[in-house]
């Protein structure tokens, strides 16, 4: 898929199907659009999703693509992603 092996979209689609709303997806810096549709699929299944912001990205292609199609419920700098993950899991979002 998307000429990438492994493909982030394939992985995120599998997580959406198997884990659904109990998952948290994170898409970090990278070139192209791989992962954007999969992150949107995760969001549509009830998962929280995080995309890295432009300022902290080396290449803002993948996170930008996810944000552009509405796949990110949160946008965070790289230094804030770990805290966002902790907050989401502590808040009980992950299916509890």
Image (spheres, rainbow, N blue to C red):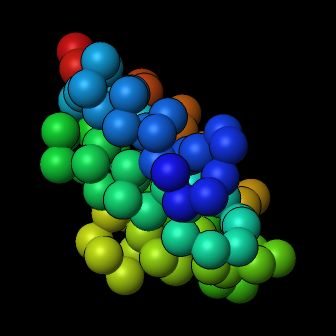
Image position of 68 (left or right of 1):
left
Residue 36 lies in what quarter of the image?
Answer: bottom left
**Quadrant containing the C terminus in the rendered view:** top left
Q: In the rendered view, tell whether residue 42 sits above or below residue 15.
A: below
Image position of 77 (left or right of 65):
right
Using the image as rendered, state which of residue 87 and residue 55 is in the foreground: 55
Q: Residue at x 26, y 48 (%)?
A: 41
Q: Residue at x 68, y 43 (%)?
A: 5
Residue 93 seen in the current view: no
Using the image as rendered, state which of residue 35 and residue 57 is in the foreground: 35
Q: Residue at x 66, y 39 (%)?
A: 6
Q: Position of residue 45 (x, y in %)?
A: 17, 39
Q: Position of residue 31 (x, y in %)?
A: 71, 73
Residue 28 seen in the current view: yes
Using the image as rendered, state which of residue 22 and residue 31 is in the foreground: 31
Image position of 47 (left or right of 24):
left
Q: Position of residue 21 (x, y in %)?
A: 22, 29
Q: Position of residue 8 (x, y in %)?
A: 56, 46
Residue 66 lies in what quarter of the image?
Answer: bottom left
Q: Residue furthest right?
A: 58
Q: In the rendered view, tell whether residue 33 sits above or below residue 26.
A: below
């Amino acid at each position: 898929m998307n000429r990438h092996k492994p493909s982030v979209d394939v992985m995120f689609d599998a997580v959406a199907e198997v884990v659904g709303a109990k998952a948290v997806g994170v898409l970090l810096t990278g070139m192209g659009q791989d992962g954007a549709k999969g992150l949107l699929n995760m969001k549509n299944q009830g998962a929280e999703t995080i995309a890295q912001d432009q300022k902290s990205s080396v290449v803002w292609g993948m996170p930008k693509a996810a944000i552009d199609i509405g796949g990110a419920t949160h946008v965070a700098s790289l230094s804030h992603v770990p805290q966002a993950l902790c907050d989401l899991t502590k808040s009980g979002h992950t299916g509890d």
